[in-house]
Amino acid sequence: MSEIHEAASLIGTRRPEPCNIVIFGASGDLTKRKLLPALAHMHRWNLIGPESKIIGVVRERWDRSHWVNYVHDQLLNFFPDAVLNPPSWRRIAEKLDVVHGDLGEAELYRKLKAALRTSEGKCNAMFYLAIPPDWHERVAIHLREAGLADEGEGFRRIVVEKPFGTCLRTAKELNAKLLRNFKESQIYRIDHYLGKESVQNLMVFRFANAVFEPMWNRNYIDHVQISVAESLGVEYRALYYDKAGALRDMIQSHLLQVMSLVAMEAPVSLDARAIRDEKLKVLKSVRKIRPDEVDKYAVRAQYATGVVDGEKSAGYRDEPMVDPASTTETFAAVKVFVDNWRWHDVPFLLRTGKKLPARVSEIAIRFRKPPQNLFARYSKETPCNELIFRLHPDEGMVYTINAKQPGLAPELRKLHLDAPYSVPGMGAPEAYETLLHDVLLGEATLFASGSEVEESWRIVQPILDAWQEKKEVQLYSAGSWDVPGIARLMEGCEGDWRDLSVDSTHEFHTLS
Ligand code: BG6
């Protein structure tokens, strides 16, 4: 990463106070893949001051030198730049400390308390729970009992990873349990989609440009499609995934959060509370799906054997640690309506799946057709204009318009006004980096409130209930877009599901 990039990306960045960054689950997967690289990157940008500590909490009997070597090796894999420069690595290593013990025993928390560093008269701490959800409550209780939730000496913040509950009831219980030990303002519920640059850009696009606002409603928009297609399968996460499925794993959290940003009203300010209130209103307005409507508004499917990237690919039920009779969905699509003045009767179509032919994520706003096809003699139809926010690959925005095909007849062709998001020579922070930085600053805008999480569960709960009753699931071949049943969700919408194949997302013509 060049110096220019570093300097440019830091404009306007606030530097957090020194803090004890405590990672529960420090030897786990999330820590090595996401948290350590994000922290090392922040360190490089001088966003973790010299007085801060990074304390790993592990079950294994690791001493400090073991932890330092472990972090070194993981960074070598996932962010080699951090360790290849010895002076920079030494500065990271100086901040590392480890505490080992049993999460269920008070002794661990006494040791942790003793390990916290006080700097400039303050003992700030962030507790990141990168541990299985059934531990969240117990850890929160122990932290409070050890006096670690008390903000007398500095701020104390607890970061909770998804899954946040497994249904509406358990999410409510978890919220209540956390709130018995920490205040809402101390709790940061991570949804890493909110940390993605292109998702944040959606808010800027909507509220820093006046031109689209008059069209951002039921009068001009036919429907909205939010899609996250993944080419990977369940990988090493079957133990979790086979109980969760795509609806819980992606739609209840990421896709509904993205939808609330698309649909929300302008907040009165950029304060966390103002933004969360607007998002919550959207979620509260989502029409309840009755049990007898589930088949009309939701589709689930599971990948069977197929071919991905030219290689034969196993079916979901043959994946390691998956129940061979599993009916867990690896693909889910849902059609919801936001019943308010702006969006009444505009479908929001949300879909996500694993082992699809490509990794593509996007938000597509499809506008209504012109009232009359004046060019019917030359072109069978006038395609709808679309505004697409690409989250992956090639973050950016594309607006499709109809123009004349050069020639003697007024035939139509589709043009794409393509605005790539990236700036040459200037990278963008990873989602986890943005989110960790915000926790350190006490900035909660990009985190879901307890009420938002509960509302999202309310939306998907009837579908979960209906699917639990069903004994069978439709299959799609790994590596194919052809998922049975999804066409019926397009009823009443203009056109088809967008073609997500990478080729078509790259096939943009630029007017410049
Ligand atoms: C996670 C899900 O929250 O998001 C995974 O648990 C999914 O199943 C991942 O693969 C997708 O995130 P991204 O950033 O790769 O789109």
Image (spheres, rainbow, N blue to C red):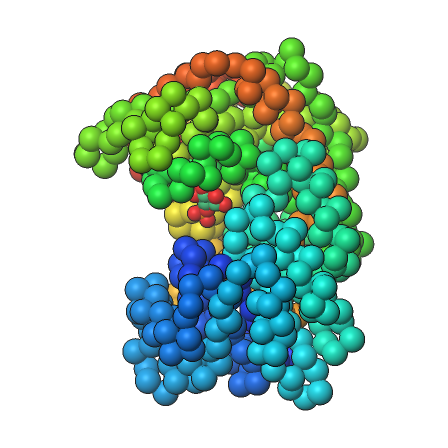
Q: With 500 as the anchor, is 400 left or right in this view?
A: right
Residue at 47 percent of width and 19 percent of height: 486
In-front residue for pair 180/336? 180
Residue 270 sits above or below residue 457 on the image: below
Specify the quadrant of the image occupied by residue 144. bottom right
Q: Is residue 460 visible?
A: yes
User: Does 124 sit left or right of 488 as displayed?
Assistant: right
Residue 378 or residue 195, whichever sits in front: 195
282 versus 21 height, above or below: above
Q: Position of residue 498 (x, y in %)?
A: 45, 29
> Which residue is located at x 49 percent, y 27 percent?
332
Residue 250's place in the image compared with 338, above or below, is: below
Instruction: Depth check: give the residue in front, 50 or 339.
Output: 50
Question: In the figure, 139 relative to 292: above or below?
Answer: below
Identify which residue is drawn at 56% across, 39% down.
255
Q: Nearer the viewer, residue 214 or 236?
A: 236
Left or right side of 119 for 75:
left
Residue 208 in view (yes/no): no
